[in-house]
Structures are given as structure tokens and as C-alpha cells.
Amino acid sequence: MGAGLPGKKEKLQFSFFNHKKHFGKEYLAFFKDYENLKYLNRPEYMKKINPNLLKEYIDKISKSKNDIMWAVHLNKELVATVKLGQIDYYNGYCDLGIMIGNKKYRGKGFAKIICKYVINYAFNKLNLRRIEGSCISKNIAMNKTFKNLGFKLEGQMIKRNKIEKRYFDRNIYALFRKKK
Ligand SMILES: CC(C)(COP(=O)(O)OP(=O)(O)OC[C@H]1O[C@@H](n2cnc3c(N)ncnc32)[C@H](O)[C@@H]1OP(=O)(O)O)[C@@H](O)C(=O)NCCC(=O)NCCS
């Protein structure tokens, strides 16, 4: 399954994250880049990356009925991972998380295209009605991406997450499915 890029012939390719296929060098490299890690609020990844820890996480996600993760490729290169997590089918909501782990592809508006794909999946395939997302106030690109996608700011958790010894607010966003 793909998503087009403006002005380009190539398409971003989406596949469900498969730990045999996608858990490799390229994916592990995402966790060696400080820019990927600093806003994730996962201090255990900040030291030397422990592949076993990541493997445990991926195994948990793969077995879960309430999480779906995709690997996103462009020309066979791993660009990003994106996840609909904590899917609650009863209440009809989930949480969206994205990492453009390959720095070559950051700052090019890819997050918006990738998120649009999974938003469409959440609303039209899973029939959910609400998607939630959150990020640290300092993460300008992610805050802008949520806003550009139509997410509304629902609240702020004050001085919640630590980055380099300082505490920052966490912004909470949500997007509702449009009435059909
Ligand atoms: C956050 C992330 C997903 C954003 O993806 P991206 O495709 O690189 O986003 P972009 O750089 O295209 O930025 C999105 C918007 O923010 C704007 N922006 C980015 N940095 C900015 C800055 N320092 N000042 C002002 N605007 C900025 C861009 O201009 C763009 O705006 P536009 O769409 O209106 O033109 C990506 O940087 C990433 O994966 N980072 C590491 C992991 C992470 O932080 N994930 C989110 C955890 S909650």
C-alpha cells in the first residue's frame, strides 16, 4: 500500500511492521540518533541502545490486538515507523505516534503524509471515531504536524517531561472523524 509524494513519481510504501523483516540494522540506527530520542520520553533508550529492550517492545506490539505499527519505506529505504496504539474498540479511539527515524527524510513534510495514511486507516478501516496524540511543547515539528492535520489541542500537562535537565509541558491533541 502506498501514499504519493507531491511532485514525485515514487510512493511511500506502508507495510505492517514485521519483526523478522524490519527489525534490523536500519531500524536500530533510528535509536542511535539523539534527534529521534530526545522527545520520546524513553530514558532507557538514551544510553547505549540495547537491542533486546527494543525487541521486547516490538514483540509486545506484534502480539497486541490493540496496537498496529507500520514500517514506511521509500525506494526500499526505511524512512519511518508509525503506530496506532492503545486501540480501544469499545470507545472508538486510539493513540498516534510517529518517528521519521531516517534523518534524510525529516524536515520535508513527510510526517503529514504518513499520518494521513494511518488516520484514514483508523477512521475507515478500524471504524474508530477519535485519534489522540501528544508531544512535548518544545517539539515544534510534531506540534505543527498535529495542527496541520486538524488535531485540536485539548489540554496541557504542565512541566511533565524532562529534556536535558529541564521540564517541559506536554500538549494533548485529538482529531475526530468527520460525520459521514
Ligand atoms: C516530529 C516529526 C515526526 C516531524 O516530521 P517532519 O516530516 O520532519 O516534519 P517537518 O519538519 O516537515 O515539520 C512539520 C511542520 O513544522 C514546521 N517546523 C519544523 N520545525 C520548525 C521550527 N523549528 N520552527 C518553526 N516551524 C517548524 C515545518 O515548517 C512544517 O510546517 P508546514 O507543514 O506548515 O510547512 C519528525 O521530526 C520526527 O520523527 N522526529 C523524531 C521523533 C519524534 O519527535 N516523534 C514525535 C514524538 S511525539
Image (cartoon, rainbow, N blue to C red):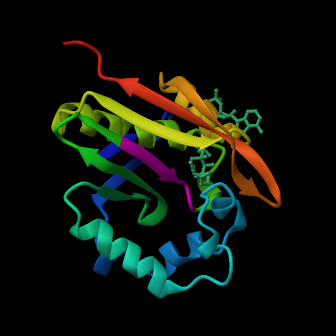
Q: Nearer the viewer, residue 12 or 154?
A: 154
* Residue drawn at x 44%, y 28% as measured from the top left: 174
- Tell me if residue 112 is in the magenta stretch: no
Q: Nearer the viewer, residue 41 or 50?
A: 41
* Residue drawn at x 19%, y 13% as measured from the top left: 180
Q: Is residue 147 left or right of residue 13?
A: right
Residue 81: % across, % down: 44, 58
Q: Is residue 28 above or below residue 99?
A: below
Q: Main secondary structure of the magenta part?
A: strand
Regarding ligand 1, which quadrant of the image does it lie in? top right
- Tell me if residue 100 is in the magenta stretch: yes
Q: Is residue 70 left or right of residue 113?
A: left
Residue 65: % across, % down: 19, 58
Q: Magenta segment, which residues?
A: 95-101
Q: Is residue 123 above or below residue 85?
A: above
Q: Residue furthest right?
A: 165
Residue 7 visible in the shown view:
yes
Kindly indicate the quadrant of the structure image that contains residue 156. top right
